[in-house]
Image: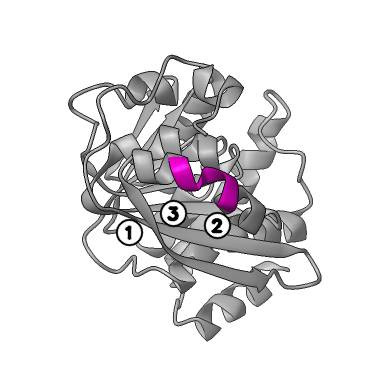
Amino acid sequence: MNAETFADRLKEHGIELSEKQKNQFDIYFNTLIEWNQKINLTAITEEEEVYLKHFYDSITAAFYFDFTKEIHLCDVGAGAGFPSIPLKICFPHIKVTIVDSLQKRITFLNQLAHNLDLDGVAFYHDRAELFGKQEQFRHSFDVVMARAVARTSVLSELCLPLCKTGGTFIAMKGPNAVTEIEDAKAAIELLGGEINEVNTFELPEDSGERNIIIFNKKRKTPKKYPRKPGVPNKTPIQ
């Protein structure tokens, strides 16, 4: 998927990129490749693959959720900025907070935001388990997102505590989503969430199945959660 096809595909879904936005994606690609030579950000480095498997894939969440509203979005474990930075480029009005456990990635994201001339973005070097315990962040975000970070049962414990009551948690997953949801039902209920919808589709160019799971946050998460760093992954809620 080249830059032109990328823009055409988004237009089919009602997202029309300006020349500025197209240029921002070009800058994003070049910054990503430059920094990837210094720190490990992605194994995907071919331009057409980056546009498809990082940029386009990130924006597919907007095919199923309305990002045109005033939203404060938290992206947990965003790595090189996926999915929140491509969404921020497409929807400049949204506020974005990214939390990631590796300082090198946070340094990259700060430089990227500068290169892209983004405002309304904040980056935090922290473990999601600790970040979710902080009063200024807990139960404070309209939307919390994670893309291919961990199993749904684990993601729920990392993300739902950050989501305000009445807010939305969006998990972007590959082909094992249905099995993961079944395994995560007890965790989702305990943490104050409920499944709203599961959207299954194929990425273009035979690039595989994707699932976008949208959860509603119906009540506050018990204070016990998230547990200490590493515990959710080692001992998921059953």
Identify the magenta region.
Answer: 182-186
Which residue is the site of mark 1? 92
- In this rendering, position of residue 125 left or right of residue 216: right
Residue 190: percent from left, percent from top: 36, 39
Measuring from the top left, give residue 124's x and y in whole percent.
37, 25
Q: Residues within 10 Å of mark 3 (few under 14, many from 20)?
A: many
Mark 3 touches mark 2? (CB < 8 Å) = no
Where in the figure is residue 6, as x and y percent of width and height? 63, 71
Give coordinates of residue 143: x percent, y percent. 32, 51
Regarding mark 1 in the picture, which secondary structure is present there?
loop
Q: Give whichever of discs 3 and 1 has the lower sequence position.
A: 1
Mark pair 3, 2: CA separation: 12 Å
Q: Nearer the viewer, mark 3 or mark 2?
A: 3
Q: Quadrant of residue 39?
A: top right
- Residue bearing mark 2: 58
Q: Please tell me whether residue 184 belongs to the stretch shown in magenta.
A: yes
Which SS type dominates the magenta stretch? helix
Q: How many marks?
A: 3
Q: Residue at coordinates 78% horizontally, 64% vertically from top-left?
A: 207
Residue sticking out furthest to the bottom: 12
Q: Residue at x 30, y 22 (%)?
A: 224
Residue identifier under label 3: 170
Which one is closest to the eye, mark 1 or mark 2? 2
